[in-house]
Image: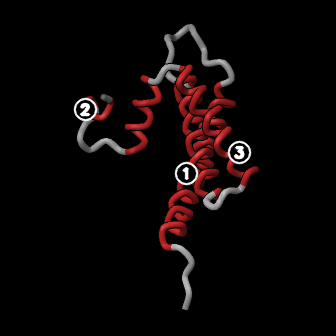
Amino acid sequence: MVAAEMPSNASLAELLSARARRTPPDRLVVDVVGGLAVAITAAWARPGTWVVWTAAGACLAMYGLWAFAEVSLLPRAWPEKIAHESMWQAVRGTAAVLGVGAFVVLLLAALGVALGPLTS
């Protein structure tokens, strides 16, 4: 497991980065496509908890996209260059911001569902 190999004071970003480096690319494709499918389907069908499902799908898709960019930006041997490095950095930053935003929406929506309607 990745967590067992990391130091005890590793941050969440370090844990996610280590996991992204060890995840096969086909699994990342499943994360992106599956997350987008869940998010789009929930937004289109609008079940009772559609915000929770849409945010969860978006969070998963953004993790997969961020992990692709993270793996693409891994250091390489000297003569080899990273193709489109600035584009991958932009994708990584955008996916990180959108993923954190989706996670915050997921937490707040799940809290709203758990609390139910509030009456005064």
Residue at position x 60%, y 51% in the image:
53
Where residue 116 sits in the image (x, y, percent)?
A: 53, 73
- Disc 1 crowd, CA 10 A, few/some/many (<14, 14-19, 20+): some
| Residue receiving disc 1 | 100
Residue 11 position by quadrant: top left
- Disc 2 crowd, CA 10 A, few/some/many (<14, 14-19, 20+): few
Q: What's the distance in space between the residues labelled 1 and 2, CA to CA? A: 25 Å
Image-based side of 57 in relation to 15, left or right: right
Viewer-proximal residue, 73 or 39? 39
Viewer-proximal residue, 59 or 116? 116
55 to 78, vertically: above or below: below
- Disc 3 crowd, CA 10 A, few/some/many (<14, 14-19, 20+): some
Where residue 26 sits in the image (x, y, percent)?
A: 56, 20
Check disc 2 and give the amino acid type: Ala
86 to 113, vertically: above or below: above
Check disc 3 and give the amino acid type: Thr
Residue at position x 57%, y 35% in the image:
66
Residue at position x 53%, y 24% in the image:
27
Check disc 1 and give the amino acid type: Val
Image-based side of 114 in relation to 91, left or right: left
| Residue receiving disc 3 | 41
Question: Which element type, helix, strand or loop, lies under badge 1?
Answer: helix
119 to 63, vertically: above or below: below
- Counting every numbered tag in the picture gives 3
Where residue 8 sits in the image (x, y, percent)?
A: 23, 41
| Residue receiving disc 2 | 4
